[in-house]
Image: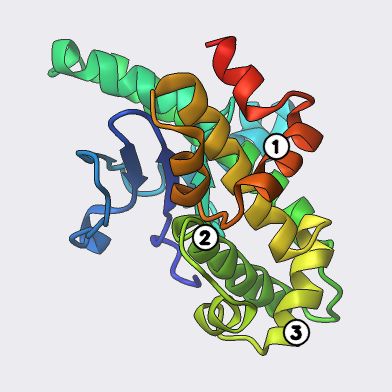
């Protein structure tokens, strides 16, 4: 993403119904198609030109410089890594607050500017954390490391989207445009565990959510989240959460 104006971030807000919140510039807005059984609501936030860059400048520049030159020339570009950003303590609360209050705040320019400045600062904090994660990938060139990070993230997102279906390493690596071995090695370096371990964790977390929030039978939950053996599922579940699926269901 080399265009200074091309600033985007996507936060995946999962609820019941699922909500997807997307942030991107007006000229780059494209229709979004989402496959989901539950209703999906989109909420788009458009930043004024150069706002995020200006927030970055104010954070990266000393107080003395900001006093001496408060209206500097156009700040340099901020190139966000294109990936899916899931619920966290930084972006999610700020986006939900804007979404909840915007209907009653239309026309209140100061309120909106304050919220967008706050969200910009939060985006930059997440942006810094992403670059720290990116350093886990060995590469002599920063551009190569960023591209590898982007592709591995695409594979991870593809796996997360289809966790309940039978999926192979070859299919995930194909989505990432990497060879299976290259994807596997890079994934372990980035996430500290294998794709299979991440897939199992995703399935177990969803199974736990369904056990606590629905009356679906344990066997059906096991099959619905992608496991094939109820006994294997129960062992994995008990090992992960310290309680069997049936005992957790009793605590509902």
Q: Position of residue 245 (x, y in %)?
A: 63, 28
Which residue, given by chain and number where applicable, does mark 3 sit on?
Answer: 182
Q: CA distance from mark 2 to mark 3?
A: 17 Å
Q: CB of mark 1 within 8 Å of CB of mark 3?
A: no
Label 1 or label 3, whichever comes before in sequence order: 3
Of residue 59 and residue 14, the one placed in the foreground of this image is 14
Q: Which residue is mark 2?
A: 157
Please tell me which residue lies in front, 97 or 15: 15
- Displayed quadrant of residue 151: bottom right
User: Based on the displayed image, in which of its 4 quarters is residue 116 positioned?
Assistant: top left
Q: Which mark is residue 237?
A: 1
Q: Residue at x 70, y 27 (%)?
A: 244
Tag 1's secondary structure? helix
Q: CA distance from mark 1 to mark 3?
A: 30 Å
Badge 3 marks a residue whose secondary structure is helix
Q: Residues within 10 Å of mark 3 (few under 14, many from 20)?
A: few
Q: Are marks 2 and 3 in contact (CB under 8 Å)?
A: no
Of labels 2 and 1, earlier in sequence is 2
**Residue 10 drawn at (x, y percent):** 43, 49
Tag 2 secondary structure: helix
Q: Looking at the picture, does residue 23 appear above or below residue 88?
A: below
Mark 2 burial class by Cα count in 10 Å: few <14, some 14-19, many 20+: some
The residue at the point 50 percent across, 26 percent down is: 211
Q: Is residue 110 visible?
A: no
Res. 170 in view: yes
Q: Is residue 63 above or below residue 141?
A: above
Question: Residue 38 location, x and y as percent?
Answer: 24, 40
Task: Identify the disc placed on residue 129.
Answer: none
């Amino acid at each position: 993403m080399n265009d200074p104006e091309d600033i985007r971030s996507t936060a995946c807000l999962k609820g019941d119904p699922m909500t997807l919140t997307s942030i991107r510039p007006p000229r780059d807005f494209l229709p979004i198609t989402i496959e989901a059984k539950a209703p999906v609501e989109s909420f788009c936030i458009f930043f004024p030109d150069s706002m995020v860059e200006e927030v970055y400048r104010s954070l990266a520049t000393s107080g003395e410089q900001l006093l001496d030159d408060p209206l500097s020339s156009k700040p340099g570009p901020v190139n966000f890594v294109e990936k899916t950003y899931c619920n966290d303590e930084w972006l999610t609360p700020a986006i939900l607050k804007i979404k909840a209050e915007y209907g009653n705040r239309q026309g209140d320019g100061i309120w909106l500017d304050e919220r967008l400045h706050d969200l910009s600062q939060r985006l930059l904090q997440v942006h810094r954390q992403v670059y720290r994660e990116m350093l886990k990938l060995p590469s002599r060139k920063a551009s190569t490391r960023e591209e590898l990070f982007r592709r591995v993230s695409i594979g991870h997102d593809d796996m997360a989207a289809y966790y309940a279906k039978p999926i192979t390493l070859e299919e995930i690596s194909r989505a990432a445009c990497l060879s299976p071995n290259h994807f596997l090695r890079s994934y372990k370096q980035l996430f500290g565990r294998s794709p299979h371990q991440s897939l199992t964790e995703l399935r177990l977390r969803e199974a736990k959510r369904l056990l606590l929030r629905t009356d679906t039978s344990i066997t059906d939950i096991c099959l619905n989240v992608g496991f094939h053996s109820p006994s294997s599922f129960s062992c994995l579940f008990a090992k992960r959460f310290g309680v069997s699926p049936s005992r957790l269901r009793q605590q509902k």
